[in-house]
């Protein structure tokens, strides 16, 4: 009898109900300031990270090898037989490679480590979809087989409040050619499926237009099939609530979820003002 564990990292943004329902193990990143280091989502909140950015932009480090070993040891103690791990993009972090290395030491467990080539909602939605398949009684091999197809149905876009933090953190990806802040040019950003780094799928002038453009882009997926929609933000609750209200009125929105604040480790690089929307096409 298979017993499947779900594993992710703290860059993953999804509702706490999903984490609790499927007993998801979350490996925490570290948020590093000049005088102190914090365990992501445990010792520091997203709001604290965003509010402190006017004074200091912290750095981050991937989950520790000890934390990874501890997770696999717990799975073995609790008689799990299989592990499905969904990680932050390998284009942003070494977590994927480190976790693959650790998993090989635990040959009692059949482990599949999936590079989401994304972060935040892009990780969280895949974790949730895996949990749904577990509820349906799907086997480990069946779920693993479905994950690449899940990825094709998942479309995650976001708008930064400013490019300052991504630029300073070295996570700017292919956005470096965007001129700018002076012209109030706002890119709509996504993660490409090959490298797992940021690309631009549209540029408009002004904050309001950029948020509207993000909704317009999502409408093409809603025209194709019913979608679950997920929204997250970084200290931009009013904008996120406005987008929630506008999208909830569109046709083919099956469910819409306000996930809340983007995780601290993602917020270090995305900064305050970021709003993300993820459209997950649902099978008919």
Image (cartoon, helix red, strand yellow):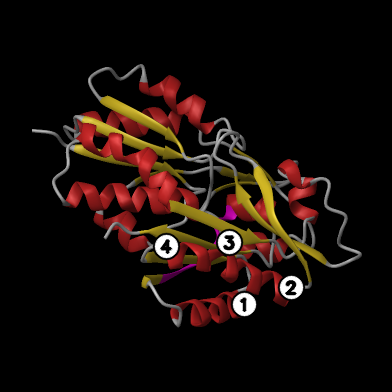
Confirm whether the magenta stretch covers residue 260: yes
Q: Is residue 23 visible?
A: no
Real-space Cα separation, disc 3 to disc 1, in angstroms? 17 Å
Q: Give the mark, 3 or 4, whose residue is nearer the N terminus.
A: 3
Q: Give the mark, 3 or 2, whose residue is nearer the N terminus.
A: 3
Q: Residue at x 20, y 31 (%)?
A: 77
Question: Is the Cβ of the residue at disc 2 closer than 8 Å to that at disc 1?
Answer: yes
Write down the residue under mark 2: 207
Write down the residue under mark 3: 46
Residue 280 location, quadrant = bottom left
Q: Nearer the viewer, mark 2 or mark 4?
A: 4
Q: Give the main secondary structure, helix, strand or loop, of the magenta stretch.
A: strand
Q: Give the mark, 2 or 4, whose residue is nearer the N terminus.
A: 2
- The numbered mark at residue 224 is 4
Q: Give the mark, 1 or 4, whose residue is nearer the N terminus.
A: 4
Indicate whether 81 appears above or below 37: above
Write down the residue under mark 1: 239
Tell me the SS state at disc 4. Answer: helix
Real-space Cα separation, disc 2 to disc 1, in angstroms? 10 Å
Q: Residue at x 59, y 70 (%)?
A: 216
Question: Is the Cβ of the residue at disc 3 closer than 8 Å to that at disc 1?
Answer: no
Tell me the SS state at disc 2. Answer: helix
Indicate whether 230 appears above or below 169: below
Q: Nearer the viewer, mark 3 or mark 1?
A: 1
Q: Give the mark, 3 or 1, whose residue is nearer the N terminus.
A: 3
Left or right of 243 in this view: 112: left
């Amino acid at each position: 009898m298979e017993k499947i564990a779900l594993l992710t990292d703290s860059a993953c943004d999804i509702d706490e109900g999903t984490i609790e329902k499927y007993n998801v193990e979350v490996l925490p990143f570290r948020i590093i300031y000049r005088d102190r280091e914090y365990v992501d989502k445990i010792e520091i909140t997203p709001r604290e990270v965003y509010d402190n950015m006017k004074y200091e932009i912290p750095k981050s480090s991937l989950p520790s090898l000890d934390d990874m070993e501890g997770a696999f040891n717990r799975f073995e103690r609790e008689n799990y037989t299989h592990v499905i791990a969904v990680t932050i993009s390998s284009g942003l972090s070494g977590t994927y490679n480190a976790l693959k290395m650790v998993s090989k030491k635990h040959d009692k467990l059949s482990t599949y480590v999936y590079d989401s080539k994304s972060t935040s909602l892009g990780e969280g939605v895949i974790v949730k979809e895996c949990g749904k398949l577990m509820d349906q009684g799907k086997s480990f091999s069946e779920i693993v087989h479905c994950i690449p197809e899940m990825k094709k149905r998942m479309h995650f876009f976001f708008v930064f409040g400013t490019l300052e933090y991504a630029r300073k953190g070295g996570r700017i990806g292919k956005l470096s050619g965007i001129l700018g802040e002076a012209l109030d040019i706002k890119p709509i950003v996504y993660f490409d499926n090959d490298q797992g780094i940021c690309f631009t799928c549209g540029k408009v002038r002004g904050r309001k237009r950029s948020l509207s453009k993000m909704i317009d882009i999502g409408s093409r997926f809603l025209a194709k099939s019913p979608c679950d929609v997920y929204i997250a933000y970084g200290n931009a609750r009013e904008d996120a609530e406005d987008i929630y209200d506008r999208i909830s009125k569109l046709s083919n929105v099956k469910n819409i979820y306000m996930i809340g604040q983007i995780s601290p480790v993602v917020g270090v690089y995305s900064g305050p003002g970021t709003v993300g929307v993820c459209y997950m096409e649902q099978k008919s």
